[in-house]
Amino acid sequence: MPPHPDEWLWGWDPTPGIVSVWAEPSGHATIWRRIAGELVREEARFRPWLVLDRTDDLPAGAAVRELTGEGALRYLVRADDLDALTSAITQAASRRLARRIGHIRELEDGLVLLPPDEQYLVATGRTYFRDLAFDDLRRLQFDLETTGLDPLRDRIFLIAVRDPDGRTHVLEGDEASIIAQLVAAVAAADPDVIENHNLHGFDLPFLDRRARILGVPLRLGRTGDTQLRQRGARRGAASQNGRKIRFVAPGRELIDTLDAVLRHDFATRELPGHGLKAVARHLGIAGADRELIAGARVHDVYLADPARVRRYAIADVEEVAGLARMMGGAAFALAKLAPRRYERLADAGAATGVIDPLLVRAYLRSGAALPAHQRGDGTQHSGAALHLFASGVAERIVKADVASLYPSLMRAYRIGPARDRLGALLALVDRLVEQRLAAKAAARAAPAGSRERYTHEAMSAAMKLVVNSAYGYLGAGELTRFADVHAANEVTRHGRELLDQMCRELAARGVTLLEADTDGVYFAVPASWDERDERRVVAEVAALLPPLVQLEFEGRYAAMLSHEPKNYALLGYDGKLALRGVAFRSSRAEPFGEAFLRDAIARLLAGDVIGVHAAYVATIRALRGRRITTYDVSSRVRLTKLPGEYHETRAARRELAYEAMLAAGRTTWAIGDRVRVYRAVGGGGLVREIDDEAGEPEDPRDYDVDHYVRVLRDTFAARFASAFTPDDFATIFEDNQLSLFSRPIAAIRPILTISP
DNA sequence: TCATACCGGGG
DNA sequence: GTGTACGGTATGA
């Protein structure tokens, strides 16, 4: 009898409260569980296992079970000790192949070998966090303040700590003592989870290196190790061999809120940046009186005003705690599903990191042989459709899109990996979609702000993440066990056809198509229509699409400026303006130009062409009268050359940002430093540095007016090119008085140009 | 101008 | 023993 598909999704062992697992190749596992708030430590034996494509390398007496079906990986081998087993296999394989096999990984195509903790979870059907809510976890946050970014040159001078009960304190003194105090604070609080922003990219590598240099034991885990362990990772610290590693403290889960932020922004694309301060401000976590200090100045400020840095560091750990709770629920919920440690699921890519483990567990639970990894046959991955039907200004805009297009197509047309003979991926996606709907309903039914609401919303987010990466799994090339580029192309082909069909059917009902991208379409409706007509048309077209593919009425807007593919502005009926795409939002854009753009586009979309002209003229007058601040003409740049490197090329080519640094008297900087610069008058393009974050910026207003007038015209006004005829455009964005033959601005109307 | 490499973050 | 989710920008040909 095949196992219940819910076992594929959830595992089968109901053991509650697991908050951490650590397993050794010797078959010894330690499980930490939180039962009614109390931590329980359990020691267990498990039989390490692996799956091979042959038995002739096995030592005599190895326990082998042959799996059923066609897959090449059909021999499930168990042993008391993993290291003894793998070394016996590599020795035998060396003899068989008459070449030295140094490590069992060299047999990669013929092998499933998971880390010991995942072997334990797959074999037992256990997962983390059953019957636990996120707030049951004991979470500690810490944040280093250092004299710089390089642990070989710089040092720690302060650590802020927030313990699981919310108490904050700062650790100070000599560096070795600060590290020892941190170790003591962690031991005293005994948290299940340690969190910080960029924990794996900065704090842990820095701490590890400083502790080694100073000879201080870094006992941060629960097993008595005096150093952190390491694992390979896609993002983290660079190791000696050039690969990336992350640190591990057995018994605790080391969670980097940057991972959650990246995952979140991947879906929403709304964050202004991924730094702690920017995210906390955006999400409303930051306090109004949040102490801010530019990174490079933290130590200098500490020497002059240590209390200020203490406030700053404590604000950091408090924000991290808030951010981790706000964004960390999805990874927490994932850990209830997939047989991996929580910290691995928090930073894993969903395809290889979540779906692959789920499929391996499903196959072994079914006693089914697994396919070996397969090389691609050279077939190219084909992508989504993108159409720009018209550019310029249109009114009465509707956006319709298909919810979760690719997984819906996989379900509707039963497209799964060819080698997945159990149909496990589609079965998992079906289950996830169904159970996510249930989780969403349960979240809605729970009181706002309640623990239940949080739990269900987090589970819904986790399930959405997995569902939406099922397609990515297909297209992952050789990296995933069941990858199938033909199936992936079949999905995108259906997607393109579906988008074309939607556009055709909408156009046939009298709308003007504007832009269509992958799974959604913007169109304009006739003046006589009201919202019911708009919804009716979307519903009519939706009814023509395959079952499981749901076309939704996503929104309606008063007007749209369609500039280029993926670059447009929308004016809502509530007066809200949304700008999309690099043409309208760029981190490098000068604030005065962005302000002009927002103001002028809002007026354009409101039908006020005179206002567009007025905004342009007003901006030029403000520049000429130097009523615009220096900050507002500056732009943000990243320094990519060291001072010495720049001096070598300076004679050949002068670069704005470095000239600014030199003009400001700065002789040292690091690669990656971000500064704001502007072009000042005199000296043929002198520029200055502005400190970005700390306090009030200087405001000498000695900027090069003519330069910024040109920037306004060439960079910002140019965004209106598609909105007017060339003559009208020239009239509106004339610098001085109107030319003789141009018609009055009041007579100008924006245009919409249908693409050929 | 186009292709590709690499960064995102931390003090 | 990990990964190839994007989109920007900086670079070199």
Image (tube, coloured by chain):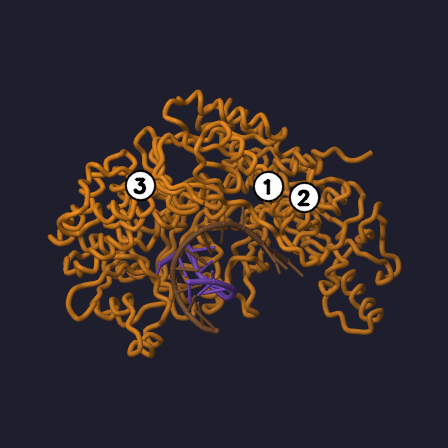
Chain colours: A orange, B purple, C brown
Q: Position of residue A398 (x, y in %)?
A: 43, 31
Quarter of the image for the C terminus of chain A: give it.
top left
What's under tag 3, amino acid-wise?
Answer: Gly
Tell me whether marks 1 and 3 sit on the same chain.
yes
Q: Nearer the viewer, mark 1 or mark 3?
A: 1
Q: Please say whether residue A78 is visible from this viewpoint.
A: no
Q: Is residue A45 left or right of residue A397?
A: right
Q: Nearer the viewer, mark 1 or mark 2?
A: 1
Mark linked to residue A358? 2
Instruction: Name the residue beneath numbered marker 3.
Output: A287
Distance (Cα) linking label 2 and label 3:
41 Å
**Element class at badge 2:** helix
Q: Is residue A692 left or right of residue A510?
A: left
Q: Mark 2 — on which chain does it sit? A: A
Going 41% across and 22% down the picture, which residue do you hit?
A: A531
Distance (Cα) linking label 1 and label 3:
34 Å
Q: Position of residue A742 (x, y in %)?
A: 19, 45
Instruction: Name the residue beneath numbered marker 1.
Output: A466
Q: Mark 1 — on which chain does it sit? A: A
Tell me whether marks 1 and 2 sit on the same chain.
yes
